[in-house]
Amino acid sequence: MSFHFAEQLTAKLSDALSRTDFSGDLPEGFRAKIDQTQNRQFGDYQSNAAMILAKELKRNPREVATAIANAFDGGELCEKPEIAGPGFINFRLKTAALTAKLVQLIADEEHLGVTPVASPKTIVVDFSAPNVAKPMHVGHIRSTIIGDCLTRVARFLGHHVITDNHIGDWGTQFGMILWGWKNLLDESALKADPIPELLRIYREVNAKTKEDAALLDLCKSELVKLQQGDAENLAIWQRCVELSKQGLQKIYDRLDVTFDHWFGESYYNDRLAPLVDELIATGVAEASEGAICVFFRDNEKLADKPALIRKSDGGFLYATSDLATIDFRISELGAEAIWYVVGAPQQLHFDQIFSISARRGQTADLQFVPFGSILGKDRKMLRTRSGDTVQLADVLSEAVDRAMLIIEEKNPDLPANEKTEIAEVIGIGSVKYAELSQFRMTDYIFDWDTMLSLKGNTAPYLLNAYVRTRAIFRKLGSPYETGGSLTLTEEAEKDLLLKLAQFAEIVPAVLDDFRPNSLAAYLYEVATTYHQFWEACPVLKVEGEIRQTRLALCELTGRVLRCGLGLLGIRTTEKM
Ligand code: ARG
């Protein structure tokens, strides 16, 4: 098992603390933290432990820092620490330690220094989950991209991840769809492209009901017939779901997103009545004005927000089916954790069902992973020119068309089929990267020009950096070969190596607070650091050990970029 630099330094730092004269006075469970520095001028890592301890011990911070630095044994790893400013302790790694790391990383082709988690968990990731026959809105785009990324990272770290597309295939929208299907359907349009046709009838009926209250009643009675098992309505419903799934599958294929299951809300229909009975019997739920509710009387946040789980007309709700889903995932999928990647407006819903789950004694670790909105350039909700919700399929096609323009300009002589493939990688990658490079709670602005720019923190910039790492081996005429001794000499080489070594520190941290954007920011730094190395250090013009070292750095940069982009769900291309 290998440790990354931050872990090694943390261990040495706690060692040093145990050797200081105040080792007996450390606060309970005190763990000194080591941070990466922004600029290697001040060392490679830094700790503010002395400042925190000085406050606790009522001593001078620089004095505490000096005591720690004197007790610190850097061994082969780092030089004697330096004290800076009000009491920061700065650590500089020894060149030999950096070189040894390069040797170790280039040999670790699969994990690039990332250590798998010590105790893998079974995690169900609930993401994407659009509603059948209703527009898949931009919120579903965010959920799909973020959920897929978290899945990839968790799997890379060794967790057992089960992805479940909890589609809304049993909502009240089916009342309108059923009526529309029977009265407005254009069969040939449905055959040609089902999702837009289903959407059209949903929208049309929805609009009509606004003016025609009687129609709303007709839709409701279609819904009731469906819920009571009417054969004709069930058959229509089933076809709608089937067609929608096929349409969605095409989008997921294009996005390179896969699901282990698509149980969907309807899967739990038969489990809802017994579940509500059980909740009443165990005293979790109670009758209230003819309906069945769960009250959260001793929960300050939810005290005045009971969850409705059965309506007075006997109908069940979104919350009821989510509770049944938790049971199923725990007992039949073996879930120890469930992550819900769903828009922030559903916070209350998840607070409620998590609280009910806890009251029932379930111990699975339930995590709500919310996200904000995508805005148009006018800072309002993203809409099409005609004012409709933006469709994911259209976004992807436009992204690929626009990426094609870049390739036509940059590399017009490529064969047409290669261009098509590369445009797909850049277009889809740009949409994903625009999403993942933002903190998920940020309402970000969807802007084609920024996301497809070759400059800045964008997918094309990162893909271009990757392409450059590959081009050097094409020029060399052979792929990277291990062997020969390596030696780091220039600062630009050390900067790059340190950055690459930090992949092992960044990847696990993505799951701490579900922040793919920290990985994106890191990859951007890798690309810029590589660029600086490239400017400062000729590779093919030098010989021997220095050339071999630089080739290793190029190869490793390529691997880190490819693997890191892969964790974001972004494919790479060898040329662009
Ligand atoms: N279909 C829901 C929506 O579009 C999202 C479902 C999220 N998952 C869940 N288990 N509730 O709002």
Image (tube, grey):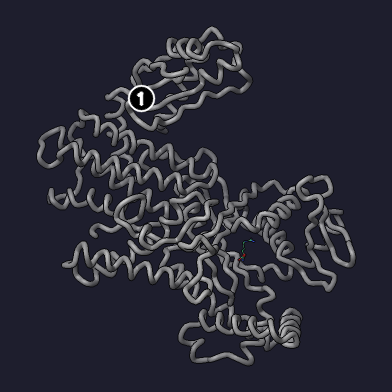
- Camera-nearest residue between 567 and 405: 405
Q: Residue furthest front?
A: 378
Seen at 46% across and 67% down, the residue is 252
Rendered view: 19 above or below 343? above
Seen at 78% across and 72% down, the residue is 315
**Res 230 seen here:** no
In the displayed structure, does residue 546 sit left or right of residue 334?
A: left
Q: x, y percentage for residue 203? A: 59, 81
Quadrant in which residue 175 is drawn: bottom right
Specify the quadrant that holds the N terminus.
top left
Label 1 Cα crowd, 10 Å radius (few <14 / some 14-19 / many 20+): some
Q: x, y percentage for residue 215? A: 72, 87
Task: Determine the quadrant in which ligand 1 lies.
Answer: bottom right
Rendered view: 345 above or below 72? below
SS type, badge 1: loop
Rendered view: 40 above or below 377? above
Report the residue marked by disc 1: 43
In the displayed structure, does residue 351 sit left or right of residue 96?
A: right
Specify the quadrant that holds the C terminus.
bottom left
- Camera-nearest residue between 325 and 64: 64
- Camera-nearest residue between 75 and 408: 408
Q: x, y percentage for residue 193? A: 47, 83
Q: Amino acid at mark 1?
A: Gly
Question: What is the tally of numbered marks visible in this picture?
Answer: 1
In the displayed structure, does residue 251 sit left or right of residue 551?
A: right
